[in-house]
Image (cartoon, rainbow, N blue to C red):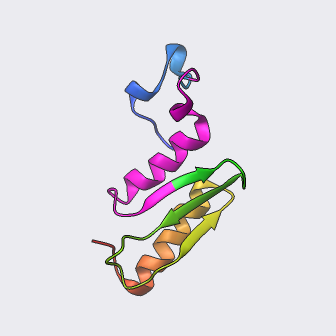
Amino acid sequence: MWNLPDHQRGPQGSLIASDPRRRPEDVLARAVQATTRGRWLCWFGRATRRYWAMAPRSYPWSGLLESDTPEGLAAAIGQVELFYGPAS
């Protein structure tokens, strides 16, 4: 599982559920985005129940990546960057 900064945790390390931006899936999507240093835009689709990512506009590849897990999304980003190079 992704390590979350202390400021994103409530008492006893639980996720802060009162803030809708802090739903566990959203926090995990932001954690994937943080691993790309913000170069990829990542989110969790509440309607699709999938994790999504989009490369920056200046990247040589355009499209959407999706996965059912944050780890799968991070792996998909890694595969695209392996072929096209890291996003800037």
User: 7 or 53, which is in the foreground?
Assistant: 53
Residue at figure coordinates x 52%, y 77% from the top left: 63
Q: Nearer the viewer, residue 22 or 3?
A: 22
Residue sitting at the far left:
88
Q: Nearer the viewer, residue 12 or 64?
A: 64
Residue at the image point whose x is 59% and y is 34% from the top: 23
Up/down of 11 relative to 48, above or below: above
Where residue 5 appears, as percent x and y from the top left, is 39, 33
Q: Nearer the viewer, residue 37 or 64?
A: 64
Q: Taking the image as drawn, is residue 1 in sight?
A: no
The number of callouts visible is: 0
Q: Position of residue 70 (x, y in %)?
A: 58, 54
User: Would residue 37 be found to the left or right of residue 76 on screen?
Assistant: left
Residue 2 pos. (x, y %) = 51, 44
Residue, x 35% and y 79% (percent of image)? 59
Above or below residue 82? Residue 77 is above
First to last magenta residue range = 17-42
On screen, residue 12 versus residue 55, left or right, reads right
> Residue shown at 59%/51% (left/top)?
44
26 shown above or below 62: above
Q: Where is residue 87, by image quadrant?
A: bottom left
Q: Residue furthest top?
A: 11
* Quadrant showing the C terminus: bottom left
Vertical relation: 4 (above or below) 14: below
